[in-house]
Amino acid sequence: MQNSEALTLTAALLAAAGDLTQRINEGVVARGFEGRPAYGFAFTRLAPDGATVTDLAVHLGVTKQAASQLVDELARKGYVERRPHPDDARARLVVLTERGWACTRAAEEAAAEAVRAWADLIGEGEVRVLRKRLLRIAPGGPIRPAW
Amino acid sequence: MQNSEALTLTAALLAAAGDLTQRINEGVVARGFEGRPAYGFAFTRLAPDGATVTDLAVHLGVTKQAASQLVDELARKGYVERRPHPDDARARLVVLTERGWACTRAAEEAAAEAVRAWADLIGEGEVRVLRKRLLRIAPGGPIRPAW
DNA sequence: CCGATTGGTCAAGCTGCTTGACCATGTTCA
DNA sequence: TGAACATGGTCAAGCAGCTTGACCAATCGG
């Protein structure tokens, strides 16, 4: 492989990720929620049964202070609540509110819609393959701004 | 496709892009250059014959002020020079210095090395396919932080 | 040849992150 | 048991990298 092709691949990855992220956010906003892209990725961690700020920080690849600020923001907008942790009095469990669930569903819808546009370009099967390869390559990579 | 899979795909894209970007930057630093990931993407635009600040801004998806600041930074570190533009006295042509070329080559090497690690995981052919699909999907997407 | 456009910079401000300090609770082990 | 250390969380301050706004010089278009 020629050298510059590797940089091209990186640029293409960034472009694809940025494109998708942007479309999802626009879709969420269009559905009546205010937010920035980070919300969706936070939701995927909070979704099942909630998580602690530290959990969230690890998932997003930021400091716990940054995660705490994000939670503040989400709470201020009514998407999440901080509850006492059942097992550990130091910790607080961050859980989605009803509105938070609604926003999560909106994000999933918007994401599915954006991906559908890709499927029209390269086929649904190829999209699935793409996803599979990527998960294989960077399983635990940071879900963060790339630069 | 189930809804949440679309968000997973996005996360995987971000993770892969972030992973690769990080590795490249580390590789460049390890080769004795100081820099941040944006440099590499700037270089790909400046590489052949230079470019104007506005060109660079479009390529990176930022304002021309931001691009100008980046050029300041690159110039301060000796990677680029601002020259008068041959055809347009308003414009200035930003060109790579010898050190800039060296850093560009280092970035390409580091990128190739990082991608090689992927080839070990999914095969070189698959990497090529991946690149092809991505270029098809988001040809002119913004080369920018995703959120 | 004059108004509108384009390339570029300066200045100020803001957002989202970081580092550092700190407190409360939990865990470990002599 | 209790002293030392580890862990979850917040508050505060600072900073990097971007934005908006204002402006100047050069070019283009009628």
Image (tube, coloured by chain):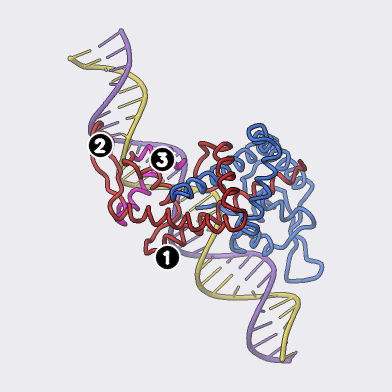
Chain colours: A red, B blue, C purple, D yellow
Residue ID for mark 3: A57
- Which is more N-terminal, label 1 or label 2? 1
Q: For residue A34: magenta? A: no
Mark 3 vs mark 1: in front: 1
From mark 3 to mark 2, how far is it between C-alphas?
17 Å
- Label 1 crowding class (10 Å Cα cut-off): few <14, some 14-19, many 20+? few
Q: Residue at x 47, y 40 (%)?
A: A61
Q: Which mark is residue A30?
A: 1
- Which chain contains the residue that carries disc 2? A
From mark 3 to mark 1, how far is it between C-alphas?
28 Å
Q: Is residue A95 left or right of residue A10?
A: left
Q: Are discs 2 and 1 both within one chain?
A: yes
Please state which of residues A7 and D3 is positioned toward the viewer in this rendering.
Answer: A7
* C-beta proximity under 8 Å, tags 2 and 1: no
Q: Are discs 3 and 2 both within one chain?
A: yes
Q: Residue at x 35, y 40 (%)?
A: A53
- Which chain contains the residue that carries disc 1? A
Name the residue type under label 2: His
- Which chain contains the residue that carries disc 3? A
Can I make out residue A65 in this image? Answer: yes
Q: Which residues are magenta?
A: A52-79
Q: Main secondary structure of the magenta part?
A: helix
In which quarter of the view is residue B108 placed? top right
Q: Is residue A27 left or right of residue A53?
A: right
- Which is more N-terminal, label 2 or label 3? 3
Residue ID for mark 2: A85
Give the total number of marks visible in the rendering: 3
Circle 3 SS class: helix
Name the residue type under label 3: Ala
- Which is more N-terminal, label 1 or label 3? 1
- Residue A46 on image: x %, y %: 35, 44
- Residue A29 on image: x %, y %: 42, 63
